Every structure is written in structure tokens, then in C-alpha cells.
Image (cartoon, helix red, strand yellow):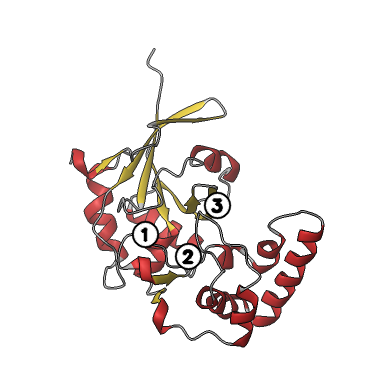
Amino acid sequence: MENRYGVNEGKEKMVESRGKRFECYAVRTTVVTGEDLLEDIIDEFVMPVLYREDIVFISEKMIACTEGRAYPVDEINPGFFATMLSHFVTRSVHGIGLAIPETMQCAIHEAGLPRILLAAFAGGVGRLFSKKGWFYVIAGKKVAAIDGPCSCTLPPYNHYVVLAPEAPERTAKRISRMLGGNTVLIVDANDLGCEILGMSDRLMDVGFYKELLKQNPLGQEAQCTPIGILRPITKKI
């Protein structure tokens, strides 16, 4: 079982927030596709390594793939507005985002054209005041979580657009029930930080877990580790 989980290269095993310390592991899986059942993935890769007090965090991309929300980029047909708006998006070294017509078309499909146009206007105003992120404040988390094709992504998803999960909070609660009650987080993490899209308990402290996961322990390339575990470190007296 030991080779099923570990610490990705360049990541720290020990993480801490507000005086509480955890061991942070990444769980290796096979390449997850729309043919896989979420229940089978949890049963095969999580259950054998799980401790009762563990907190499980799962990439939103993996959840979306099991839901069939990953699309080959060459099967997406961008419209006029998607093509036009994508030209105003700044490309980042951390991901292509909405800077190509195909991902922008998916954003329009997810949020609706009026909302995306309003978000684009807000983003333009934000630039005038040197403020970043106004576009996504209006467009919403589902749009912010859209992943475009990237050469460093695990094949075949280096040629796919992957949307956000349909209902991440509901899915987090469902997985928690599968595990017998362990805390579960659905996360959108990258090398810039972490957003929590869904959690099994509404009363959880989002800021606390974002701090623990800010190093992006699942990695952003071809590690094939879409699931992670936070294991509390308890002091022995």
C-alpha cells in the first residue's frame, strides 16, 4: 500500500495552520475518465489507506471527469462572442484559462452570455484601477474552475477542456457517506493557491483548509494524484 500514497516532489509533508499540524499526502490513482464510477475510485484507492481521523481532499477535475464534464478541445465550436472575448484575456504561465475561444465558449455555456459580458465589463473596469479578479467575481466559481488544454497536463487531458463539477458540495457529502463520515473537500488548487468548491460540512472553516492546501499538494502536472489526505498529528503525553 505504501506506493499508493506519498508526497509529491517539491511539496512539504508537514503542513500547519493556526497551530494545528497535519501530514499531507497525495494518493496515486489510474487515469480517471468518464467511464469510471466515483464509488469504485473511492473504494479502490482511498479506503485501503484511510485512517478514521483523515480529511480527504479531491481535485475538482477528477470529479468533473467522472461526471462526463471533460470535452476534447477540437469538438468545441466557439461562437462570435467567445472568439472576441478570449482575445482580451491575459495568458498566464499557470494555465491557459479563458484565453482561447474554446474555454471561453464553455464559460458562456456555464454562466450564460449576459453574465459573461457583465463580467468582462467588470474586468475591464478593474484593469483601469489595477484591480485583478473582478471578472471571476461576477462570472462565478464554476467559470473560474474551467481548465483548458495544457502541455504539462496528464494525457489525454492535455487536449481537453474540463469544466467544474456539477454539484461539488453534494458530491463531497456523498463521498463522506461512502467513507463512513470522514471530512471531505472538493478543491480547485493550482500553484497560485486553493479554492474549496465543496465540503461535506457547511460549518467547516474554509480559510483554515485553504491555508493547509496552499502549496497545491496534488501537483499541477502529470503526477496522477487527484486525491489527497490530511492526517492530524496528535501530541503524545
Choose mark 3 or mark 2, whichever is in front.
2
Residue pictured at 53% horizontal, 48% vertical? 194
Say whether marks 1 and 2 touch (CB < 8 Å). yes
Query: Which residue, given by chain and number where applicable, does mark 3 sit on?
Result: 195
Instruction: Left or right? Give the position of 75 relative to 5.
Output: right
Could you tell me residue 62's position as x and y percent?
37, 61
Could you tell me residue 205's position as x and y percent?
58, 42
- The span from disc 3 to disc 1 (Cα, nearest Å) is 19 Å
> In this orientation, does residue 200 appear?
no
- The span from disc 1 to disc 2 (Cα, nearest Å) is 10 Å
Quarter of the picture holding the C terminus: top left
Choose mark 3 or mark 1, whichever is in front.
1
Q: Amino acid at mark 3?
A: Glu
Q: Outermost residue, top direction?
A: 237
SS assignment at label 1: loop
Nearer-N-terminus badge (1/2): 2
Q: Amino acid at mark 2?
A: Asp
Taking depth in this image into account, of 184 and 78 the one nearest to the observer is 78
Q: Amino acid at mark 1?
A: Thr
Could you tell me residue 109's position as x and y percent?
56, 80
Taking depth in this image into account, of 29 and 183 the one nearest to the observer is 29
Query: Which residue, given by chain and number where applicable, does mark 1 sit on?
Result: 153
Query: Which residue, given by chain and number where applicable, does mark 2 sit on?
Result: 147
Residue pictured at 36% horizontal, 66% vertical? 158
SS assignment at label 2: loop
Nearer-N-terminus badge (3/1): 1
- The span from disc 3 to disc 2 (Cα, nearest Å) is 14 Å
Local packing at callout 2 (Cα closer than 10 Å; few below 14, some 14-19, many 20+) is many
